[in-house]
Amino acid sequence: MVVLGGGLNLYAPEYGEPVMGSYAQARLQYAAHLKRQTGLPMLFAGGKGWASSTAQTSSEAEVAAASLLRDTGMRIEWLDKTSRDTRENALRAYEVLAPLGKTRILLVTNDWHMARSVKQFENAGFQVIPAPMGFVQPPQVPVFDYLPSASALATTQLILKEWLGLLLT
């Protein structure tokens, strides 16, 4: 199983250290659920992204490993601490897993990120079984469909970024 990073919060006073961003935390939580169900080993892919702050000292993979161990007692078998984007996630994961004969993977990322991720991982040489999570949900109160909202704008930004990324991939 390969789990894609999705950002960090550089410092969480309540923990005294960096923590996973909301997308990355949700991906990690779902991966832990799948690991409990399947027993599959896990690779977490995430270094320091292209837009990372110079204050970031730990990779996303290191923070994910510490978080999962702290919260569940589970260990992540392989950490990709160097990739900066989805393409590099795929290439680094292949460098680690292919020599072990592991080229068929369960890929965990958000629903809106899956199409581009699958393409990158297939281009790297993997046979991919998508394990999407974090699906974009319809509004709970339909009358709000006609009102602008910050969450709708954020979702639109994500979808447009992924659409553009897919076109450029």
Image (spheres, rainbow, N blue to C red):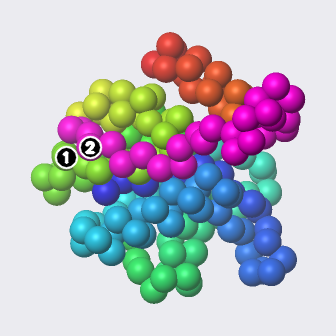
Q: Name the spot of residue 91 as percent of width and height, x first.
A: 36, 39
Relative side of 115 to 64, left or right: left
Q: Secondary structure at mark 1?
A: strand
Q: Secondary structure at mark 2?
A: strand
Structural crowding at the residue carrying mark 1, measured as other residues with C-alpha within 10 Å and reported as few (<14), some (14–19) or many (≥20): some
Q: Nearer the viewer, mark 2 or mark 1?
A: 2
The kind of residue on which mark 1 rests is: Arg
Q: Name the spot of residue 23 as percent of width and height, x first.
A: 62, 52
Mark 2 vs 1, N-terminal side: 1
Judge whether residue 128 is colored magenta.
Answer: yes
Q: Residue at x 25, y 72 (%)?
A: 39
The kind of residue on which mark 2 rests is: Ile
- Nearest the camera: 111 or 86? 111
Residue 162 image-quadrant placement: top right
Q: Number of labelled discs?
A: 2
Vertical relation: 114 (above or below) 60:
above
Q: Residue at x 41, y 50 (%)?
A: 108
Relative side of 163 to 154, left or right: left
- Nearest the camera: 50 or 152? 152
Q: Which residues are magenta?
A: 126-154
Q: Which residue is mark 1?
A: 104
What is the C-alpha distance between the residues marked 2 and 1? 7 Å
Relative side of 144 to 85, left or right: right
Question: Does the CB distance between marks 2 and 1 fall below 8 Å?
Answer: yes
Residue 113 seen: yes
Q: Which residue is mark 2?
A: 129
